[in-house]
Image: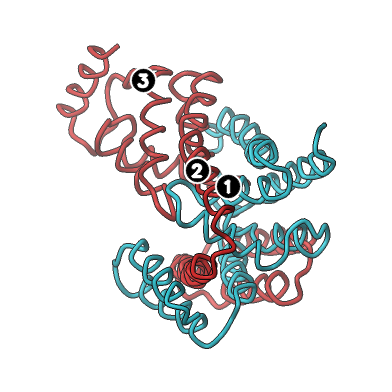
């Protein structure tokens, strides 16, 4: 009755939760590695589609987790994967918030924060790179990715326009 | 509840924006749930700016400095940043039930919408045009993620050591595809120790 992969799915996201420094975006390469390469729950193409869907909906980036869960084990999978992704880190945050006031200006806290920043930067760029590689990468798709990157870095254009442009170019059959 | 909320807002306005309020605002569990529900619905590709607008500019639950502190703590812990912010703000006003209400409010509607979208997509996934459209969206969305990484890189202020650490992390995860656990177990302590040794400068 229960989906056979549900328990394993839960365990995967419970551990990913505590590794997700830098949020869902920084964790995507490892999610991809586990879900596509290790467990073969999704193909590359399906992973990309779930990511695209999550970007086309309002809400936090972590939503992609519920879509992956859904693809693996239905609606229950979607809810359970999301709960597993959020629960351990939330409990940790609650506990740390409780203690945080004492460490407000502590040099160690500042060092941890400064030290984690470049690691997170590397992970997020890796995330964009892995996602780019999992998309069918013809020349047009590649150009679309670079155009979006440059536009977002250099201008204040709302990201939704760029996703819309991507959808349009795709629907015309150019990607 | 409404009355005390508006009273504290007035007292904060009188005390000027930059200084912390004399009387902390009273925020009910209900308000936490519904305000975060709105925040969850408003953001595409990143909800944090909307959470900031709601809590600091519109409702005045937090000052800029308080928000920055909540954000910096949630950024150096694992977990989606916005979920961690919701946990901390919910806890601040209503303890465990506030934290739960804020997170539930934040995630509820986006989950319903995205799963509904997935069901619709599943029906039309065989349509060539729909599949191609989503490939195009994915290509653009990868660019959004790359841009976020590059923008965050600015915060390292051009430090060569920081850029080297970012580059090594990128190669380990993006190209070598090593497990995140091992990469973090090595890179995080190394980077923190370097930041610690350079703290005086």
Q: Nearer the viewer, residue A79 or B83?
A: A79
CA neighbours of label 3 inside 10 A, class few (<14), some (14 to 19), many (20+): many
Where residue B173 appears, x then y in whole percent? Answer: 70, 69
Tag 3 secondary structure = loop
Hey, which quadrant is residue A100 in on the image? Answer: top right
Where residue A116 appears, x then y in whole percent? Answer: 60, 58
- Chain A visual colour: cyan
B142 sits left or right of A45 in the view = left
Q: Which chain carries label 3?
A: B
Given this view, does label 1 or label 3 mark the residue nearer the observer? Answer: 3
Where residue A129 appears, x then y in whole percent? Answer: 60, 74
Residue at 14% over, 27% down: B14
For the N terminus of chain A, the quadrant is top right
Q: Which of B189 and B88 is in front in this view?
A: B88
Q: Please give the residue where the numbered disc 1 appears in the rendered image.
A: A109
A23 sits left or right of B45 in the view = right
Chain letter, red in picture: B
Q: Which mark is residue B27?
A: 3
């Amino acid at each position: 009755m229960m989906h056979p992969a549900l328990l394993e799915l839960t365990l995967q996201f419970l551990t990913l939760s505590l590794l997700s420094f830098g949020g869902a975006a920084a964790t995507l390469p490892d999610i991809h590695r586990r879900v596509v390469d290790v467990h073969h729950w999704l193909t590359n193409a399906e992973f990309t589609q779930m990511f695209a869907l999550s970007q086309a909906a309002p809400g936090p980036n972590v939503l992609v987790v519920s879509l992956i869960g859904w693809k693996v084990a239905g609606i229950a999978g979607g809810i359970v994967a999301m709960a597993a992704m959020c629960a351990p880190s939330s409990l940790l945050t609650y506990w740390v918030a409780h203690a945080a006031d004492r460490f407000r200006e502590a040099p160690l806290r500042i060092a941890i924060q400064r030290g984690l920043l470049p690691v997170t930067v590397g992970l997020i760029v890796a995330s964009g790179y892995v996602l780019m590689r999992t998309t069918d990468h013809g020349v047009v798709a590649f150009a679309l990715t670079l155009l979006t990157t440059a536009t977002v870095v250099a201008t204040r254009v709302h990201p939704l326009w760029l996703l819309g442009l991507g959808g349009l170019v795709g629907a015309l059959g150019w990607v | 509840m409404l009355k005390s909320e508006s009273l504290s807002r007035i007292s904060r306005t009188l005390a000027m924006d930059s200084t912390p309020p004399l009387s902390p605002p009273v925020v009910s569990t209900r308000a936490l749930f519904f305000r975060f529900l709105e925040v969850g619905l408003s953001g595409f590709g990143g909800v944090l700016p909307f959470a900031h607008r709601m809590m600091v500019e519109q409702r005045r639950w937090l000052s800029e400095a308080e928000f920055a502190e909540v954000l910096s703590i949630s950024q150096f812990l694992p977990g989606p940043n916005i979920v961690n912010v919701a946990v901390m703000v919910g806890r601040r006003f209503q303890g465990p039930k506030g934290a739960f209400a804020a997170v539930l409010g934040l995630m509820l509607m986006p989950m319903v919408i995205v799963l509904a979208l997935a069901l619709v997509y599943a029906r039309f996934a065989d349509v060539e045009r729909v599949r191609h459209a989503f490939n195009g969206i994915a290509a653009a969305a990868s660019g959004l993620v790359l841009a976020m990484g590059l923008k965050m890189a600015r915060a390292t202020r051009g430090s060569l050591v920081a850029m080297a650490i970012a580059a090594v992390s990128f190669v380990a995860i993006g190209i070598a595809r090593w497990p995140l656990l091992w990469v973090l177990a090595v890179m995080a302590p190394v980077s923190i120790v370097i930041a610690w040794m350079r703290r005086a400068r």
